[in-house]
Amino acid sequence: MARAHVETILAHESVPASLKEAIKRTGAWASFRPLSQALRGGVSPRADAIVVIVPDDMRPVEHGLRVLFDRLADCPRAVLVMQPGSGVPAQLDHPATVPVTFGSALGADELASRLATMVDMRPSLDSLHRSMLANRQQEENATAAYERQLRLARQVQREFIPENLPNFGPVKFSALFRPAEVVSGDMYDIHRLDEEHVAIALADATGHGIPAALLTVFVKRALRGKEIHNGSYRLLPPTEVLERLNEELLEANLSECRFVAATYAVLNTRTMVLELARGGTPYPILRRRDGRLELLRPAGSVIGVLPGTRYPSQQVQLAPGDSLVICSDGVESVTAPQISTTALAETFSRAAAAVRAGTARERRRAAALVGAAACEDNGCFGAASSTTAVAEIAEEPADSSGDALTGIERPGRRASRMAPDEAMLASAWCATLRGEGPQAALQQLTVRYDSLRRMGYPLDDLTVLTLQIQP
């Protein structure tokens, strides 16, 4: 049977006599190397246990010891760190897979027993290391397979999202499409229904990644604006298209990403009348030729939540020089003002105080504080926008008698608040849209989105469609 090998690494010149005697008693053979040499060449793979001798003042060698411990993670061995005197070395961080003990110069008998235990640990450490390597390889294989699936999903998704948008006479389309991940939960489509009518669709599935991307495939198939029967066809009004999509999503009973926000419109290219319905997306922005901005406000909540939901449409007459902007709620993360964490904490503190107060009115108010975003369809930042809820609460008029819920005065609260749609129209992005037109606004969004992504800012999928009637 091969003799055990105890490698002693010297960060101090003195080797305790008790260590030499302990190694002799275990029958192991010993090797001695300076710490600098061990850092250059690594620990011997034949070593069964490691002893490190350190000086009383460990500060000069702390960095080297941490490097040594990190390298041992690839060849784990039990390690004893000791000083030649009676002191106990200071504890240092080390990988969890490398068992390190910090002890004093014990007697030869106790050291021999400890060394024997450390040597006996090698088979278990080797087995654990092999298992970890196998698990790591499995994880790498799973990651590689998932990345292949992502690339395939991206390819499939890109094939049904038009890159070159069609133009219809004076009607010109442009798009900004920025996935937050490899694949997107957004989709858009523009296609001719017949010689006079063009369908315009934009959808935003809940969530990210492959489930959301697959849901967009389902949504595109379900957004059918024409029904063919017995050799003739019928164009479906936007209201009916979204109502059918709502019922199909409910019937599908998907386990992930069940809900969708969508806008669907039909443009008559002869009369330039646009009919539009929406469910949960931001209000479309109509820019008149003179730069005036109007919000199209058809009501409509998120699709796929409740059966029988109605999506009333709105008609608008377009004229040469007019433009229409339809976007997903990813525009919020790029253009919306940021709400401070202080305001957010204050909001939930007030909600908790309302719950503790216990009256029916105060409980309803608490529900409004934390649930308004899920309940309202504000049409600006999208349904279920917590930013909107917090913004509105944070800007409530101050009460001279104190907070409406807690009675505590809150100095400096603003006496007025801006509605979400007004906040959008007042944004710098809409100022560009108003003054320079949709192309400049798209360019501004593109630059800002890409800049925020480079800075690591959390972003959502962003899709913006523009329709322009050439003069």
Image: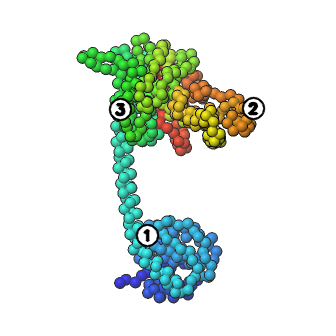
Q: Residue furthest front?
A: 359
Q: Measuring 40% from the left and 15% from the top, which residue is drawn there?
A: 268
Tell me where residue 184 appears, x and y as whole percent.
42, 37
- The numbered disc on residue 14 is none
Query: Label 2 to label 3, Cα distance in Å?
Result: 52 Å
Where disc 1 sits, the SS reads loop
Residue type for callout 2: Ser
Whole-Å distance between the Cαs marked 2 and 1? 69 Å
The CA distance from mark 1 to mark 3 is 56 Å
**What is the residue that sits farthest to the top in this orientation?**
271
Residue pictured at 48% horizontal, 15% vertical: 316
Q: Which amino acid does label 1 sit on?
A: Cys
Which residue in the protein does label 1 denote?
A: 75
Residue matched to label 3: 251
Asked if residue 337 shows in the view, the reply is no
Question: What's the residue type where badge 3 is placed?
Answer: Glu
Q: Quick check: can you spot residue 256?
A: yes
Name the N-terminal-most of marks 1 and 3.
1
The residue singled out by tag 2 in the image is 400
Q: Quadrant of residue 266?
A: top left
> Viewer-proximal residue, 387 or 317?
387
Residue drawn 72% across and 37% down?
407
Mark with earlier residue (2, 3): 3
Please tell me which of labels 2 and 1 falls first in the chain.
Answer: 1
Q: Is mark 3 on a helix, strand or loop?
A: helix
Q: Do the residues labelled 2 and 3 touch (CB within 8 Å)?
A: no
